Image: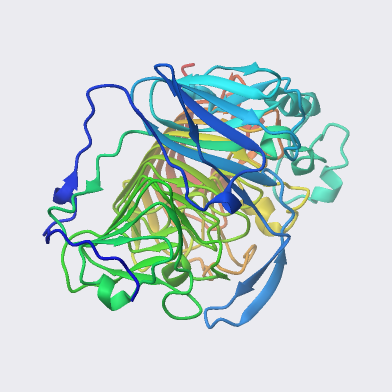
Amino acid sequence: MNVKKEVTGIGVAVIASFTTVITGWAEVWTYDVPGGEALSSADYEVSVTQNGETKSSFVYQSKGFATYPRLRENGSLDQMVTIPHKGPAKHSHSIFSFDGTVTVRVKIRPGAEHITLPLKSAKVLPSSYDIPCWIENGNTIVFTLDRPEKVAILPNYEQTWNKFVNMGKGHVPIQTWDVDYGVESKRKDYHGRELSSALEEGYANPLILSALPPETRVPNPKKQKTLFVNPGDRLNEDEMLAYDVVWFRPGIHDHSQMGYAPFFQTRIKRGQTVYIEGGAYVLARFKRYHDKEAGPTAIIGRGVISGAKHLWIHSFSEASQLIDIDIVSGITLTDRAGFSIYSSRLIEDVTLVGAWHGNCDGPDYSDNSVIRNCFFMSHDDNLKINHNTKANHIVLWQATNAHALMVKETYRSDTLMADSVVEDVDIITYFKDPNVARGDWPRQGMGAIACVTAVPYTIQNFIFRDIRIESPYLYRVFNVYNLNTGEVNPGWFMPTTDESHSKIDGMHFENITVTSPLIAYRSQLGSGHENAIKNITFKNIVINGTGVTEENKEQFFDIQEERIDGLSFSCER
């Protein structure tokens, strides 16, 4: 055991023993990574200025591989998966905390992949945050922040966006899923034949910025028995369990081989806190395993957890990067090997980046949970809504697979999912491409906001409101459909019958604005079974400047009205 121990006392409660950071004046905290040269971006530099003082902010880089091995749960090879990376092809990300007001400068380095210098335009997304920016010296994007936010910075934004604007002129979406895409795509008025392949500049290589508030949950070593872990220290599970807090100091920590193959989990106990200090980069998969203690398990801080050295295994409960952690706050999760956060109760100020293949989902199994103030980049279902999920103030970057916002679609032991509220969400990209995904399932199942299920439960009283979508193109905007697996089944759904299938009773969509130059398919509402959907309302839905009403709904929606009881559209905008 080579861990340097600093023990200052034993605490009894995780949350009650945090040190609250309160400042009487404006301040900026940046986080260098000792020994982190191999992690640093070749494409971007970031600096933060406040009251005449400028600090550099470390910039990480992430890039996917051309192929990935996907393993079965027993560790054997299932298949090698080839991934054509587009939107993004790579990206960088930087983290700092502040209060007051700061000026941020994002400099693009010479030779940055996919980015043309000198810059002609730039954009800070989401647009709803109203953060104007300007260009200095042809290579630096400058903007001011007066509040903590998580944003994407896109060099030469207008050059790519306008390409899709021109592409979308005169475009007519495909009207229904059950037509031959190959035939439809040859129509003169269908212009979606080149979508993900046309993503360039900042959409191919963005910078994700996590500008966080001052920390308020720093553990207090005077009240809790604390194990300080330095880079290079070796951890032992049994000895870790003797501490209330495990504190990772700045630098690179490789614990990717801790635990048992093939999952290699760093197992912690109920009531324990893992504090990832800013500047700490921890290669680990954390799981709450020991339940002898009491209280919530927490992973908090301003550091980074990486799955770069773990393998892709299809298992939520064993191969997510964070498993059964009650509180996840302030951290960045990058290069996850598969699923991200499994079964947490509070997810706040979390940034997910480095999503490069299937199963790189956002949080899941989040019953009775709060998800707030987050940025999620995913390559599979992103913000997934379960029972009594409350999601607020989220930014979603969706790559070329699955759904940006998705109601849980696979097996659950409960027969009811109810009372979830999703609000103040910005979907800044949704890059599923119908030219690549032409099979029955994507044509039937895709949508930026989707509830496509085949599980014998009832979805009741779900609310989606105050959502903005701004993407150069969209596969489809909405998709609410109860699947008949006798017609379409991607392989992971339970078989449905006329007696056993999903039901929806109460789903409300309100104040949703869509800005996208090219939408490939009309939205879809319907069911493969009778008596399966009722009480669906759309209020103040605006798609490319046009409000959706009872009179014009068929311009935007493919609707099986005979299978929906109680469907209404209204728009006051």
Residue 246 place in picture, x, y as percent: 28, 61
Residue nearer the viewer, 404 or 303: 303
Residue nearer the viewer, 270 or 41: 41
What residue do we see at 46% from left, 17% from top?
572
Residue 32 place in picture, x, y as percent: 46, 43
Quadrant assignment, res 200: top right
Above-or-below relation of 63 to 265? above
Above-or-below relation of 314 to 245? below
Residue 306 place in picture, x, y as percent: 49, 58
* Left or right of 26 on screen, residue 126: right
Q: Quadrant of the N terminus?
A: bottom left
> What sort of colour scheme is used for the picture?
rainbow
Above-or-below relation of 166 to 175? above
What residue do we see at 46% from left, 39% from top?
95
Quadrant assignment, res 192: top right
* Left or right of 2 on screen, residue 467: right
Residue 97 seen in this snapshot = yes
- The total of numbered circles placed on residues is 0
Residue 499 seen in this snapshot = no
What residue do we see at 32% from left, 75% from top?
237
Residue 386 place in picture, x, y as percent: 38, 54
